Image (cartoon, rainbow, N blue to C red):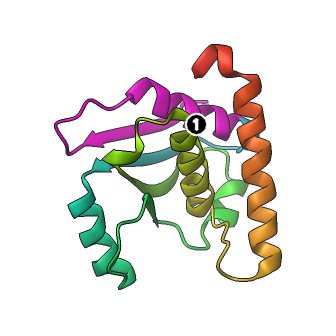
Amino acid sequence: MNHEILIYNQTKTKAPRKFICGVILKALNFLKLKQPVELAVLIVDKKEIKRLNKVWRNKNEIPDELSFGLNSRQIAALAKDKNKVLELGEIVVNIEKLSDKNYLAKLLIHSLLHLLEYSHEKSAAEAKKMEKLEEKIFKYLNICRGKIL
C-alpha cells in the first residue's frame, strides 16, 4: 500500500526523516488499514509549538507533540472504500524531542492514534483503550527494531 508521509522541518536541526517514516509506516502496517494514508509531520521549535498550543488549545505551555486531524468522523466511511486516500492531518513535534528515538517513536504513535480518532480525554475507558493500543504498537516496533529503528 502506498502511504504518503510528508515531513516538513521548520528548524535548522537535521531531522531523522527515515526513522520518522519507518515508525509511522510500521504502525500503519500493524493497524491494518484498508486504504492508503496521507499525513504530514511538522518539526518545529519550542516557541512555535507553544504558539500553536496557545492558538488551537488555549494552553500556554510547551507540549512535546500536537496532532491536528482532518477527518473528524469521516474515517469510518472512508475505511469502507479501499480506493480512497485517507487524509489524516498533521503531527507537530517539538524539535527538542527528536534525540531520544524511543520517546520520539512513542510520540509519533500517540499522535497517529489521535489522527485516527482515538482519544484519552473522553473517558477513562477510552484512555485505557488508547494506552493499550500504543503499547501493542510500540512492542511491535521493538520486534521490528532491526529493520526500522
The quarter of the displayed image where residue 17 is located: top left
Determine crowd level at label 1: few under 14, some 14-19, many 20+ residues with C-alpha closer than 10 A: few
Residue 55 in view: yes
Horizontal relation, residue 9 to residue 114: left or right: left
Q: Nearer the viewer, residue 71 or 115?
A: 115
Residue 10 horizontal/vertical position (percent)? 20, 45
The quarter of the displayed image where residue 62 is located: bottom left
Q: Nearer the viewer, residue 70 or 101?
A: 101
Whether residue 8 appears in magenta in the rendering, the answer is yes
Q: Which quadrant is the N terminus positioned in?
A: top right
Residue 21 horizontal/vertical position (percent)? 48, 32
Residue 32 in view: no
For residue 8, above or below residue 87: above
Which residue lies at the image location 69% right of the left edge and 55% below the top edge?
79
Which residue lies at the image location 63% right of the left edge and 15% below the top edge?
147
Whether residue 75 appears in magenta in the rendering, the answer is no
Q: Which contiguous range is marked in magenta?
A: 1-29
State the SS at label 1: helix
Horizontal relation, residue 126 to residue 112: left or right: right
Residue 97 horizontal/vertical position (percent)? 41, 46
For residue 26, above or below residue 116: above
Q: Which quadrant is the C terminus positioned in?
A: top right
Q: At label 1, which amino acid type do we have?
A: Asn
Which residue lies at the image location 55% right of the left edge and 43% below the top edge?
103
Which residue matches tag 1? 102
Q: Nearer the viewer, residue 71 or 83?
A: 71
* Residue at the top extreme of this rendering: 146
Residue 108 horizontal/vertical position (percent)? 53, 47
The quarter of the displayed image where residue 102 is located: top right
